[in-house]
Amino acid sequence: MSQRKWVSSHVDLIREGDRPESIFLITQGFACRYKILIDGRRHILGLLVPGDTCDLHVAILNRMDHSIAALTACDTAAPSNGPVRRRWLSLDGRRR
């Protein structure tokens, strides 16, 4: 079972500096990982397509080192229980 969320285009799913609360999966639409440069320009780090997770490696980060934004309307799913969610929660103490 998972928690589903529909996000409009041009909306941040998570921002640089935020504390990641969960991982999520892009099930429809397209998103990107990006950083804002000192001069205000956006630097695209990667594109996310249906089936991509955002991101499994954030479990080791205390704060996000990049932002993730919907390029089109996106449907996302976050694990609500099961092995991935339990693993995520077990890492929580190490992320502080």
Image (tube, grey):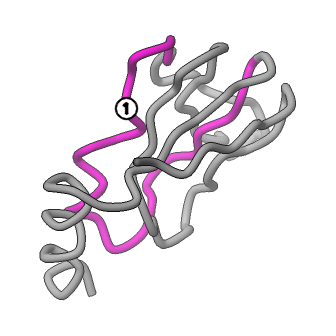
Q: In which quarter of the image is residue 71?
A: top right
Residue at 75% x, 37% y: name it. 6
Q: Where is residue 66 in the image (x, y as percent from the top left)?
A: 50, 47
Kindly state the secondary structure of the residue where label 1 is placed. strand
Tell me how many marks there are: 1
Q: Position of residue 56 (x, y in %)?
A: 26, 44
Q: Where is residue 77 in the image (x, y as percent from the top left)?
A: 51, 40
Q: Is residue 74 left or right of residue 81?
A: right
Q: Per the image, is 33 magenta?
A: no
Residue at 14% x, 82% y: name it. 94
The span picked out in magenta is 48-71
Q: Position of residue 4 (x, y in %)?
A: 61, 44
Q: Per the image, is 63 magenta?
A: yes
Q: Quadrant of residue 91?
A: bottom left
Q: Which of 44 and 77 is in front in this view?
A: 77
Q: Name the residue under label 1.
A: 53
Relative to 16, does residue 74 appear above or below in the rendering? above
Relative to 42, does residue 15 appear above or below in the rendering? below
Residue count near mark 1 (Cα–Cα under 10 Å), binned few <14, some 14–19, many ≥20: some
Q: In this view, does 7 lie to the left or right of 84?
A: right
Relative to 39, does residue 17 appear above or below in the rendering? below
Q: Which of 62 and 36 is in front in this view?
A: 62
**Looking at the figure, which quarter contains the C terminus?**
bottom left
Q: Which of 47 and 80 is in front in this view?
A: 80
